[in-house]
Image: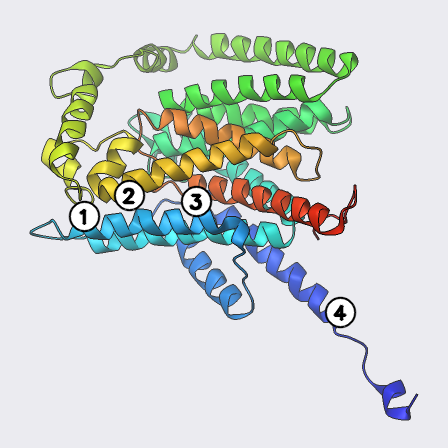
Amino acid sequence: MTSAALTAPAPFLPQRAAISIIASLMVAFGVFLSGFVINEPAPYELFLVVLIGVWAVFGLRLSKHIAPLIALYVLFNIGGMFSILTMDDVKGTPMYMAVSLFLAFTSMFFAAIIEADQRRLTLIFRAYLAAAIITALLGILGYLGILPNGEVFTRYGRAMGAFQDPNVFGPYLVLPALYLMHGLLTGTLKTAPLRAFGLTILVLGVFFSFSRAAWGLLAISIVLLVITMLIKERTGAFRLKILVMTLIGALLLVGAIIIALQFDQIADLFSDRAKLVQAYDGARHGRFERHAIGFLMAMEHPLGIGPLEFGLMWGEDTHNIWLKALMDYGWLGFVSYVTLMGWTLLLGFRFLLRDRPWQPYLMIAYIVLIGHTMIGNVIDTDHWRHFYLLMGIVWGCIALEMRWQAGLRKTGQAHVPLPA
């Protein structure tokens, strides 16, 4: 061995490790910013534009495992661009489509970086949880009038945290609520009080949003989580633990709601919002009639009528993600969106219960995604930032599983090393 070889510097592994850590922390900070969207463009968009750009320059890899996500979101947005061509006055629709395309890129980005390193899932969920706790507290304290000038965190007498709409604020809190609930059901007693406290804050945030979609989303997600865990966990003792803790949690939740309803302001608004069909739903030209009208219009406008035009035409937005796709993105966008959701839910279900390090994250995100798909029938989730994050998490976990399976086929072994 030559003296030059002896004095040569060691491989740049420490430097690469440091860069990887910094990059992951930047991702976590970006996710944290998703909880604060009072103005647009929000800090979330501005930060992620830079982050994705820098990552793309220094080696962002989009693998074949997330190709369906990429291709179908691109087709979806091409449908929106064709829809603009039908408009006499495009107004601000190019910017709307630019946001749509950017949010699609964020979904691809999260999927790619999760596939590259499954440990980023922990950072993403923890950053999301921190943001949700803070924005929920802002909404709760603002609603209760405890914060000075706290009305900035409310709208229409409903909590909305650091968001622009209570109907986005409430659903945003459901993923971290399920994350904490899963931790309560599987974790130790030592961490249970802190998780229970955080879960209480998030549930109160959902409740004070007075969003029927958020209430339904939380209820559906909790039920699906309990059922999935009962199927996955085979031991009788663990199943008993899940059932007992779920029953205790349900009783505490009911008790908290009963206490809250003793206040007239809360009781009156709850009574009004708890109605399954509001006046603006079933009235003439109400939400449901507009849905029927919109689907009939789609038969005559295969390219759509242009982004946001339906709301200008009828005075209210579509409040239905499927109709939104037809009106704003045309039949091309609609078919792409339906295919993407079907593909995502099918693959996610196929991989849902496999014993992998990322399985809990896939399970939680998949369940909340199912809930968002269901509430999409009565609300428009098109530009919800956390929805695209959910898609990225699920597809990142799908890609991890595909890499795992490819490793098995390549080596012919029963076990292969887990992706880093």
Q: Which residue is mark 3?
A: 36
Q: Residues within 10 Å of mark 1 (few under 14, many from 20)?
A: many
- Marks 4 and 2 sit apart, C-alpha to C-alpha, by 45 Å
SS class, disc 3: loop
For badge 4, the amino acid type reads Leu
Q: Amino acid at mark 3?
A: Phe
Mark 1 or mark 2, earlier in chain: 1
Q: Between residues 351 and 253, which one lies in front from this camera angle? A: 351
Q: Amino acid at mark 1?
A: Ser
Query: Where is mark 4, residue-wise?
Result: 13
Q: Alpha carbon of mark 1 to alpha carbon of mark 3: how far?
A: 31 Å
Residue 392: give x, y in percent of width and height. Answer: 50, 45
Instruction: State the residue in front, 159 or 51.
Output: 51
Q: Is residue 307 left or right of residue 166?
A: left
Residue 108's spot in the image, x, y percent?
47, 51
Residue visible at 36% across and 44% down in the picture: 38
Mark nearer the N terminus (4 vs 2): 4
Task: Please say if the residues under marks 4 and 2 sit with CB atoms less than 8 Å apart.
Answer: no
Residue highlighted by disc 2: 333
Q: Left of 65 or right of it: where is 235?
A: right
